[in-house]
Every structure is written in C-alpha cells, then in structure tokens.
Image (cartoon, rainbow, N blue to C red):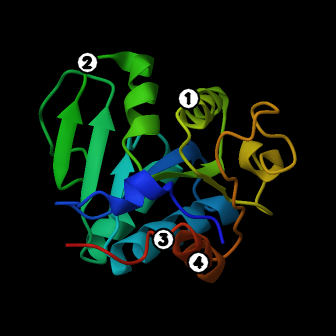
Amino acid sequence: MVKLDEAARAAPRRHGFQVSVLGSADPGSPAFERAGEAGETLARLGITVVSGCGSPATRVAAERALAAGGRVVSVIPSDEIGTADWPCTVLIPCGMGDARNLIMALSGDACLVIGGRAGTISEVCLAWLHRRPLLPLTGCGGWSDGLFANPPDERALAPILPWGTAAELEARLAALGLTSGAP
C-alpha cells in the first residue's frame, strides 16, 4: 500500500485533504465524463477539489464537485476577482498566467491527471519534482494514458497510481490514505 510520507500523515491537520485536478478533455469525450465523475467522487469523500478550471475537463470536475456538495478552490491565471464565471467555493486570481502551474501542482495532497496537453505536462513535472502522488486517468486518451509507463524521469519521486473508473479512483485515494482524516 502506497501512503503519503509518514511526516505528512503524522502532522495534525486543521483542514481536510485536497486533490488538484490537472488536464484537459473535450466535452462529450470519455475523459470529460470521467473528470465529472472524479469531481463527484472527491466531493463525496470530503476531499477539496483544487482546479484551474481552464479546460472543460477541470471545469466539469469542479462543477460536479460543487453540485455534489463539495468544496472547490479555483486557482485562475488572471488577476480578476469576479467569481460569476468560475465554479468554486474559493477563488484565487493569482495573476501569474501559466506560472500558476506550480501553485496547482503544490496545492494538492495528490494530483489527478486527465488527458492533458502541454500545460498539463508542466504541472505533472512540477508535482513530480515536489513528490506529489500522481493519479492519471487511463483508457481515455491524452497524455495521462502513458504516464504510468513513462514517468517524468527515472527517480521515482512520487507514486503513479492509474485509474479508469470512479471506483478505481476511490481505491487509489484510499491507498494514499486520503479517504479518512477530514476534520
């Protein structure tokens, strides 16, 4: 069983677990549907969704997490504070453009990877360097499909736990110790 490192699990938490949702997938695609299911699953488990909402996949994860009664933190690239357009409980307008990828990578206890393009690769590599577990969606296309077989480099800095269904995602989250301990 893969778990977060002992120091991270032993430290008292005043907040629940957070999972960053990274990636991209077009509406109507299987990956888009899995992204929405992932948002609902995270909400049901009491895990806060951290999303940039910059792609349809990350946006639908946030929307469905909110619809399921969950918490969503949206880290957006602009410096605009208006929340009308962003599905979130908390909005962080970082004003950093693509440099926000580091914030996205570090804001989760783990990073869910759905499909993906160049920005996703950047976020995944940053998460890897900072030892965040990666949860790539497989079987739906995109960059996440090959992440398990082709990690960012040879150092094995973080676990890579693929999933293809909401049940598999929940099992991977449990393996990381992220399904209990919410305040």
The residue to which callout 2 is attached is 95
Query: Which quadrant would residue 18 be assigned to in this image?
Result: bottom left
Q: Which numbered disc, 2 or 1, marks the residue that appears first in the sequence?
A: 2
User: Which of disc 2 and disc 3 is earlier in sequence?
Assistant: 2
Report the residue marked by disc 4. 166
Quadrant of the snapshot with the N terminus: bottom right
Question: Alpha-carbon neighbours of circle 3 within 10 Å: few (<14), some, or many (≥20)?
Answer: some
Residue 143 percent location from the top left of the image: 75, 42
Instruction: Give how far apart the Cα atoms at labels 2 and 1 are.
Output: 19 Å
Instruction: Estimate the x, y position of residue 127 in percent, counting from the top left.
Output: 55, 36
In space, the residues marked 2 and 4 are separated at their CA atoms by 33 Å
Question: In this orientation, which residue lies closer to the viewer: 109 or 56?
Answer: 109
Name the spot of residue 47 as percent of width and height, x first. Answer: 34, 67
Between the C-alphas of marks 3 and 2, the distance is 33 Å
**In this picture, residue 110 sits left or right of residue 33:** left
Q: Which residue is mark 1?
A: 126
Question: What residue is rendered at 69% in x and 68% in y?
Answer: 163
Residue that label 3 marks: 177
Q: Nearer the viewer, mark 4 or mark 1?
A: 1
Q: Amino acid at mark 2?
A: Gly
Q: Residue at x 44, y 69 (%)?
A: 178
Q: Is residue 58 visible?
A: yes
Say which label, 1 or 3, has the lower sequence index.
1
Q: Contact, CB < 8 Å: mark 2 with mark 1? A: no
* Residue appearing at x 59%, y 44% in the figure: 24
- Say if 173 sits above or below 112 in the image: below
Nearer to the camera, 11 or 159: 11
